[in-house]
Amino acid sequence: MKRWAEKIALILAVCCALAVMAAYATSLHSEGRSLAAREKLAQQLRVRVAERLQASGAQHLGPLEPPVPLSPAEESARGKVEAETLMVRMDEIESHRIGNGAGSVDINFIKELLDKPAANWTEEEVAQLRQFLAAHQGLLAELRAAAQRGIALPALDYSEGFALQLPHLQALRDMTRVLRADALLQLRDGMAEAAIDDLIAIMGIADALQDEPLLISQLVRFSQYRLAADTLRDIHNAGGAGPQFVQRILRALDAGLGREAFADSIAMEGMVGMRFFSDPDLEALGEGVNSPPYRFLLNLYTTPFASPLLDADEAVYGEILAEAASFAGLPYYEARERLRALEARLSATSRLRVFTHLLVPSLDNIFLAQARQEAVIEVARVGLAVEQYYFEHGAFPESIGGVAGYLGGALPVDPFTGAMLRYHAGGAGFHVYSVGQNMEDDGGEENSDLLQGDIVWRGGAPAQKMADWEVRNGADFLYGAGAISGNAACVVKWSF
């Protein structure tokens, strides 16, 4: 009996030793995979961002550390305006309230007002908005000037991981909301040029976020460009701008594509996420993951016996984000198949990789958001180029190829398909469109459901819109010596 007990004990000891050795080998293998993923993520960041490392301030520990941007003071020395200065000024708006109770006017009033078409605003709401913005014209002028000079974002400590605080994002969003509200008032008063100044400022503020390689920052940038697109459409539909503004708007739109900034943000998302595994802290992920099951897993993962699970989890997470970052800089139509394969891999990943499933963002949705952003910008660029073509030639181009010269010689393609943007022109006008994310040509029909319909830019009634613009602004402004170059006789055929 004693001999059997000794044999069983020996077998158990050998099994335990093998288990420990297997766990150790697995951890080493996972650690190697994690290291490779970190290096790949670091390499995905653009050279432009990496070159912004600074010796002072934050300690740089090598290629696996996120790059530290120039400090706001250094950016300011280059002529940029510090975002923190604007945030202090924005506090004046965010704390300003006119009246009390249900009829009070504050920043929330502006947000609610922008949720409905300006045509549905009541006269009382217009008067309230006008009174509120009149008290902050100085700040609006500062925002326009800052957007033109460039905005230096606050220096961030990426080592904080998911606990990193980003209060400037809300302030930047409020800045663009205030500018859009002002643009709509300016259009209501027939002040098209002032509305365009607000539009350019909205895009300039959004573009500042291209220097912040965080996914949430890029999603905020997308939302700001949606405001810009709505504002541009309002200006266009009002016939509110003349030909001398088109190139200025086109230049601003050119800067807004930001596919490289999007790719950087995916890489940084992976690098920040991998920090989480070294010291898991569910508090940083919000209240939604503080349930008992997650707490149990966290406690389990902190034990030495479960570390192989955490190590393997980290390796899978890093590999998925590194792979996503490797093709995030491609047009959506080129990245689509690789994205589907990566989504399939994530779906097939064991549910034991708990934090991978918890931390990996919805890749399909964020890639589609970037593609929609590009489509909105590209159809607007081509639409404005068609307007410019009409101004100079007195007719719409027969094909979209006729406007390449206005866009630097290269025509943008539909980010969803890789084919040329659709273009149809007739005597009454034209429309340019992307087929959108359903990949189907719906004939230029839009749909409030983002999953359906096309992304469209429409232009029309050129002669009448130009006549209306000339009446508001004066023929001398158009035909005067300092107006525009080219054949003045073509001006009456301008469409906007």
Image: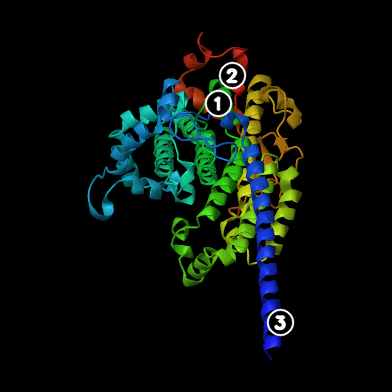
SS at mark 3 in the image: helix
Q: Does residue 406 appear anywhere in the picture?
A: yes
Is residue 238 positioned above or below 307 on the image?
above
Give the residue at mark 3: 7
Identify which residue, 487 or 27, lies in the foreground: 27
Q: Image quarter for residue 76?
A: top left
Q: Label 1 to label 2, Cα distance in Å?
A: 8 Å
Q: What's the amino acid at mark 2?
A: Val
**Label total for image:** 3
Check residue 466 in the rendering and tell me which mark sits there, or answer none.
Answer: 1
Residue 328 visible in image:
no
Question: Marks 1 and 2: CB-CB under 8 Å?
Answer: yes
Q: In this view, does 365 lie above or below 424?
A: below
First in sequence, mark 3 or 1: give its number: 3
Q: Are marks 3 and 2 in contact (CB under 8 Å)?
A: no
- Give the alpha-carbon distance from disc 3 to disc 2, as whole Å: 100 Å
In the figure, residue 198 lies in which quadrant?
Answer: top left
Q: Outermost residue, left direction?
A: 100
Q: Where residue 153 sits: x, y (%)?
A: 44, 34
Which of the labelled discs sits on residue 420, or is there none?
none
Q: Mark 2 points at which residue?
A: 491
Amino acid type shown at disc 1: Met
Q: Where is residue 142 in the image (x, y as percent from the top left)?
A: 37, 27
Q: Where is residue 489 in the image (x, y as percent from the top left)?
A: 61, 14
